[in-house]
Image: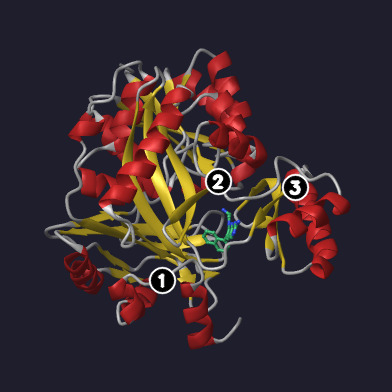
């Protein structure tokens, strides 16, 4: 096992990793920008080292500084958290070249899943159900029009290097295709330096269901059920839950086994998420994320496992501490993301926290790096906390969420907390009858298009 781990991240996820290290008797090293000298992760880690100025590109994305910080502190492994360098295959290669361990998948797995066409080809070959569409890349408008005829409109054109909704265009008819095809291509080129695109049948009202998988890198893998993350705004998740309210135990067992077998087959190591669109009882693969996700705590809650601990174990060459048969679902969990943002347009709202009070009690987990008097810097993501609640069933989890939100105090900046009070008054949230478009439609109806 490692003696010392460096955490190449900040905020609540850095605390999450420090906590796992401490429980495992591993020393932790925080890295920080000059803007984060007073951040909670710096205070909570055993050691801290400054890696650059406020801008992420010069600090949390500064590979040379992070490698140097390992050498200076004697850290043997790097946990990337999510975002920043967590899905950067070149970074993983450099880490390995310096005889350090990246706590996550191999550079090759990250590379394969980072290219959406290669990811889909790979998953299809492994027996994972995919959205019907082009076989690989679509080189020109003529081929695109043929695909449109073959699968029927609407279709969606996606950049192979895309992500976060960038480089994605829907074509509702052949007349639409020219501009949609060219726009998707241009966005792929300008955002990711890659203009290759592929085409899928456009699913109009799916849910976003993602399966948590975990591998030991030696051909063993498990699944930890699904999360429903359909409540999103502009591709930012807002409210996530596990298990999915629309998924039956049989569906879970079937798609779960398909996913676990797929990642076992490629000797996948660590945590991964296989994303699906789910419509009319069918799963359609869209992407795989090769990192620990923001919303992993809802899975931890219902399965009673520590996913970061498992990541560290397998990275050190140890087996996972559970098998598929050990994994049983206990109740229902919901996470809401607390962002420092001003409603109704969700504009970032950095500033000083004059008062912070975290909720507590049975079934409540608050993952946040806030403290009284902390100043949220303007340079990074606006996520300032995740409130995770668990109940014996979904109604109990929703009641607990309502109760915990009532205890939560974040004063000094605007936050998304009022949004959740309002959402809890909606029938669709209680029935679980929502899809990927529900939240944006609801926001439009309340506040108008902004
Ligand atoms: C789709 C789709 C409908 N049909 N693919 C959005 C981001 C990227 N991860 C995939 N996305 C979508 N792909 C087909 N064939 C609709 C979306 C989509 C979406 C997916 C998940 C969650 C929210 C979404 C919001 C808009 C569009």
Crowd band around label 1 with a 10 angstrom C-alpha radius: few (<14), some (14–19), many (20+): some
- Which quadrant is the C terminus positioned in? bottom right
Q: Earlier in the sequence, mark 2 or mark 3?
A: 2
Front in this rendered view, residue 393 or 67:
393
- Tell me the residue that label 1 is attached to: 434
Q: Nearer the viewer, residue 252 or 422?
A: 252
Mark 3: few, some, or many residues within 10 Å (few <14, many ≥20)?
many
Position of 304 compared to 87: left or right?
Answer: left
Q: Are marks 2 and 3 in contact (CB under 8 Å)?
A: no
| Residue 404 picture location, percent across and down | 21, 68
Q: Secondary structure at mark 1?
A: loop
Numbered disc 3: secondary structure: strand
Q: Which residue is mark 2?
A: 130
Q: CA distance from mark 1 to mark 3?
A: 29 Å
The answer to which of marks 1 and 3 sits earlier in the sequence is 3
x, y percentage for residue 246? 33, 62
| Point 61% across, 31% down: residue | 111
**Crowd rating for badge 2 (residues with CA inside 10 Å; few <14, some 14–19, many 20+):** some
* Label number found at residue 9: none
Image-based side of 205 in relation to 150, left or right: left
Q: Earlier in the sequence, mark 2 or mark 1?
A: 2
Q: Nearer the viewer, mark 2 or mark 3?
A: 2
Quarter of the figure with residue 79: top left
Q: Quadrant of ligand 1?
A: bottom right
Disc 3 marks which residue? 197
């Amino acid at each position: 096992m490692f003696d010392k781990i460096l955490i190449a991240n900040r905020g609540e996820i850095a605390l999450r990793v420090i906590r796992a290290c401490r429980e495992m008797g591993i020393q932790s090293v925080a890295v920080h920008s000059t803007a984060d000298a007073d951040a909670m992760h710096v205070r909570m880690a055993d050691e801290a080292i400054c890696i650059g100025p406020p801008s992420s590109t010069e600090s949390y994305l500064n590979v040379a500084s992070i490698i140097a910080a390992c050498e200076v502190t004697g850290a043997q492994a790097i946990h990337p958290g999510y975002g920043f360098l967590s899905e950067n295959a070149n970074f993983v290669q450099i880490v390995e070249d310096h005889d350090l361990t990246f706590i996550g998948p191999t550079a090759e797995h990250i590379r394969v899943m980072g290219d959406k066409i290669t990811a889909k080809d790979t998953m299809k070959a492994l027996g994972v159900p995919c959205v019907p569409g082009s076989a690989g890349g679509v080189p020109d408008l003529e081929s695109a029009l043929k695909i449109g005829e073959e699968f029927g409109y609407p279709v969606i054109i996606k950049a192979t290097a895309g992500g976060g909704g960038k480089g994605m265009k829907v074509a509702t008819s052949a007349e639409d295709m020219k501009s949609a095809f060219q726009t998707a291509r241009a966005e792929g080129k300008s955002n990711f330096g890659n203009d290759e695109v592929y085409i899928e049948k456009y699913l109009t009202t799916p849910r976003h269901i993602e399966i948590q998988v975990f591998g030991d890198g030696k051909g063993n893998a498990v699944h930890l059920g699904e999360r429903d993350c359909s409540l999103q705004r502009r591709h930012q998740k807002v409210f996530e839950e596990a298990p999915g309210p629309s998924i039956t135990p049989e569906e879970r067992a079937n798609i779960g086994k398909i996913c676990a077998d797929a990642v076992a087959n490629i000797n996948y190591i660590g945590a991964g998420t296989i994303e699906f669109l789910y419509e009319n009882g069918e799963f359609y693969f869209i992407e795989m994320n090769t990192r620990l996700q923001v919303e992993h705590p809802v899975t931890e809650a219902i399965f009673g496992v520590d996913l970061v601990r498992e990541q560290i174990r397998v990275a050190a060459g140890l087996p996972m501490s559970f098998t598929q048969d050990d994994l049983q679902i206990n109740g229902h969990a919901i996470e809401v993301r607390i962002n420092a943002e001003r409603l109704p347009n969700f504009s970032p709202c950095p500033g000083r926290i004059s008062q912070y009070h975290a909720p507590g009690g049975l079934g409540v987990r608050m993952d946040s790096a806030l403290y009284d008097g902390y100043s949220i810097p303007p340079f990074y993501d606006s996520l300032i906390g995740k409130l995770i609640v668990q109940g014996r069933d979904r109604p109990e989890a929703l009641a607990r969420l309502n109760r915990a939100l009532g205890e939560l105090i974040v004063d000094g900046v605007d936050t998304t907390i009022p949004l959740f009070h309002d959402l809890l008054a909606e029938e669709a949230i209680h029935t679980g009858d929502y899809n990927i478009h529900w939240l944006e439609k609801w926001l439009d109806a309340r506040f108008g298009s902004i």
